[in-house]
Image: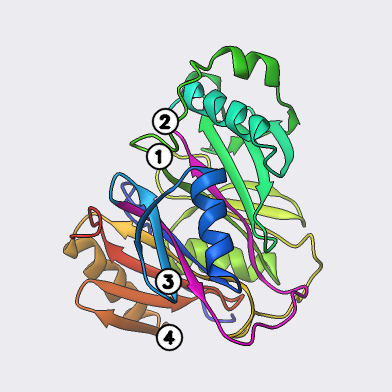
Amino acid sequence: MSVVIPKFQISAATQLGHLSLKVADLEEQTKFYTEVIGLELLNQTNLTSILGVDKQILLVLKKISNPLPITKKTGLFHVAFLLPSRNDLGNALIHYLTNKAPLIGASDHGYSEALYLNDPEGNGIEIYCDKDRKFWDIRPDGEIVGITVELDGDNLIESADGKWQGFPKGSKIGHVHLKVADLQETELFYTRVLGLDLKTNYGDQAKFFAAGDYHHHIGSNIWLGRHTPAMVANDLGLDYYTFSVVNAQELTRLEQHWQAISANYLKETFDSLSILDPNGIKIKIQIEKNGLDA
């Protein structure tokens, strides 16, 4: 973009809501996310499964017809489910090991501990818990620096009580990590259009953004290469993800900002806006809701 976009800051109380995936085999994916990962099936039709925790929607699976073969495109790198405590993450690890879940990695990031898996259709998943903030590497300018070292799995298992019953109440999507086409355009969008802060900048490889003082709500990388093409309607994978704002006033403030900069957005309902980022990824901004009945 050649125009100068004024600084805008979204409310620090803004959180991620839910994420939607386009899938080829709805039955298999639903079974995987409930029996293996730990989500609860909240509602289901022939074409859609709605999953979450304690009536709170976290994941929507949508069956699509004539899906295209998976190729290198922008979209989801992984969706990261944040568990309330280290005990919960330890219980999850025991469950995954016992059930031979497709674990592909485990890391200590300094501010968090994380397990990594892939679902049957290749979508990345992170299950993690945050460490106490006193252990975070927070710099004077607000940067929150992460590391990637081997997770002490034995110690994590020792923290568990063995009472796995799926994701506990309070679990949520902590962050979404995206495959993008251009890091500079992505930074401009997420900081100036959406109003997040750049929290960590890994040079020409990855950037991480957040509302408020969190380490990151959005990750972005170009590890597939630069100028990766955007997904199309019948590609498998990411459909959209949502941010939840606290009230109508915050949604109106965001819409007024978008109007002032002539952003191309859609007002889907009175309490929901949507916009595409520069990588063709759809984001919905909604007033915070509590479960299926909201």
Inter-mark Cα distance, 3 to 2: 27 Å
Question: Which residue, given by chain and number where applicable, does mark 4 sit on?
Answer: 264
Tell me whether the residue at label 4 lies in contact with that at label 1, contact meaning CB atoms closer than 8 angstroms. no
Q: Residues within 10 Å of mark 3 (few under 14, many from 20)?
A: some
- In the foreground, 89 or 101: 101
* Residue 112 horizontal/vertical position (percent): 57, 30
- Identify the residue at horizontal 48%, vertical 39% (top origin): 82
Q: Amino acid at mark 4?
A: Asn
Query: Which numbered disc flags the more N-terminal residue, 2 or 4?
Result: 2
Inter-mark Cα distance, 2 to 4: 37 Å
Question: Which residue, given by chain and number where applicable, does mark 3 sit on?
Answer: 48
Q: Residues within 10 Å of mark 2 (few under 14, many from 20)?
A: some
Looking at the image, residue 100 sits to the left or right of residue 19; the answer is: right
Q: Was residue 271 drawn as part of the magenta stretch in this picture? A: no
- Identify the residue at horizontal 66%, vertical 80% (top origin): 230
Q: Amino acid at mark 2?
A: Pro
Q: Residues within 10 Å of mark 1 (few under 14, many from 20)?
A: many
Tell me whether the residue at label 1 lies in contact with that at label 2, contact meaning CB atoms closer than 8 angstroms. yes
Q: Which mark is residue 84?
A: 2
Tell me whether the residue at label 4 lies in contact with that at label 3, contact meaning CB atoms closer than 8 angstroms. no
Query: Which numbered disc flags the more N-terminal residue, 4 or 3?
Result: 3
Inter-mark Cα distance, 1 to 2: 6 Å
Q: Was residue 77 drawn as part of the magenta stretch in this picture? A: yes
- Identify the residue at horizontal 59%, vertical 70% (top origin): 25
Question: Which residue, given by chain and number where applicable, does mark 1 sit on?
Answer: 171
Q: Which portion, as a residue range, is magenta?
A: 56-84
Query: Which numbered disc flags the more N-terminal residue, 4 or 1?
Result: 1
Q: Which marked residue is nearer to the observer: mark 3 or mark 2?
A: 3
* Residue 50 horizontal/vertical position (percent): 39, 62
Query: Which numbered disc flags the more N-terminal residue, 1 or 3?
Result: 3
Could one spot residue 217 in this view of the protein?
Answer: no
